Image (cartoon, rainbow, N blue to C red):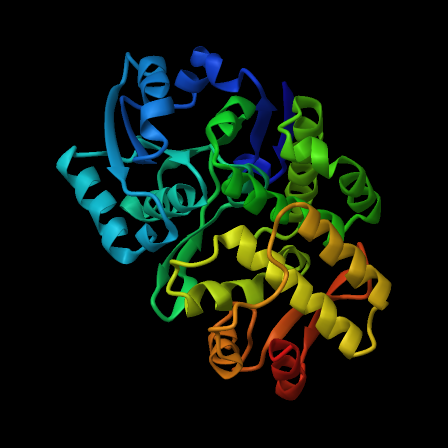
Amino acid sequence: MRQISVQLAKRSYPIRIGNDVLSDTAALASLVMGKQALIVTDENIAPFYLPMIQAALQNKSVHTLIFPPGEQEKNLGRFTEVMHTLAEIKASRDVTLIALGGGVVGDLTGFAAACWMRGVRFIQIPTTLLAMVDSSVGGKTAVDLASGKNLVGAFHQPVAVLADLRTLKTLPERELKAGLAEVIKYGAAFDVGFFSWLEKNIDALLALDETALTEAISRSCRQKAGVVSRDETEQGERMLLNLGHTFGHAIETGQGYGGYLHGEAVAIGMCLAAKLSVQMKRAPAADTERLVNLLKRAGLPTGLPAELDSETLLQHMKLDKKALSGSLRLILWRGLGRADVVADVPETAILNVLSG
């Protein structure tokens, strides 16, 4: 097992990565400090892993809440259900919430933990590659609105992230590929050496090779943990983790959260950000070609779907959380491993790249 620490003084916490993380029932039980726990999961995950978590907490008063899967469930209505459930079980301030699932479950559960009695403990148990390398780490929690993704949320750190690689064996292939988009993002934004490693090992990752997966997840989490430790609330460096996300979130919103998966939309978004960087003469075209080729090898989309209108996408982008006083700030790059924040990008340039 590998362990990485997110260093946040008294709120520091471990990310545990390995094939037997959930087998350590004593370690899991020790994270639940009070008598009560609420496990939030979805209908796809519950049959596989819920009994294991319940058994580990047999000496606690454990309640469960199971939702249908999908981004469309990450809304204020489901958040309210979690709040009502906590009220019904008379949860006190020492209750622990447990997010068992992918990014949707983690974001929703974390936001509920941030809000119940102004903040209670929660544990992230990510069961998708995307959640393991990205959404479970760093304390960003939120729900979506029809007008935009993750607009209602809070920064609230978990007490631990438990990433058991065995859960990836039940992950649909499409979800695995979507998670690889976020892995590739770390190389594209921060580390050209890691990007080159991914070019050599992408087939092994698609084949769920244990050694390759452990290395990719560990390197991704180590990169994110370092950034979060230095810039927890996204005032500067942490914005770079959003390479491709301004475009990607607009795509998800434009499709009503029922089209591309988050990782798929981010893959397209990274391609658009890279192409815009070339158009603005900020980066070499050869690096964009390497990015597009790697994403294609990972089985990810690299171009916008025809049904999305450029002007509508631009309007969705204006609700991005990095915008200030109505002015967009985009994460672009100067080439592989060199992402940066760019303000005042001309709308004509954005529309041009959106139009293909």
Query: How many marks are shown on the rendered structure?
Result: 0
The residue at 83%/77% (across/down) is: 281
The residue at 42%/54% (across/down) is: 154
The residue at 64%/38% (across/down) is: 221
Residue 260 lies, with reference to residue 320, above or below; the image says: above
Asked whether, in this view, residue 282 is left or right of residue 61, the answer is right
Asked whether, in this view, residue 282 is left or right of residue 16, the answer is right
Locate residue 218: give its quadrant.
top right
In what quadrant of the picture does the N terminus appear?
A: top right
Asked whether, in this view, residue 64 is left or right of residue 220, the answer is left
Q: Position of residue 113 (x, y in %)?
A: 35, 42
In what quadrant of the picture does the C terminus appear?
A: bottom right
Locate residue 143: give its quadrant.
bottom left
Considering every residue shown, the one lying at the far front of the view is 306
Q: Position of residue 8 (x, y in %)?
A: 59, 40
Q: Position of residue 174 (x, y in %)?
A: 51, 43
Asked whether the viewer can see residue 136, the reply is: no
Considering every residue shown, the one lying at the far left of the view is 88
Asked whether the viewer can see residue 282, the reply is: yes
Residue 8 lies, with reference to residue 19, above or below; the image says: below
The residue at 86%/67% (across/down) is: 284
Q: Position of residue 48 (x, y in %)?
A: 37, 23
Asked whether, in this view, residue 188 is left or right of residue 121, the answer is right
Residue 126 lies, with reference to residue 285, above or below; the image says: above
Residue 309 lies, with reference to residue 301, above or below; the image says: below
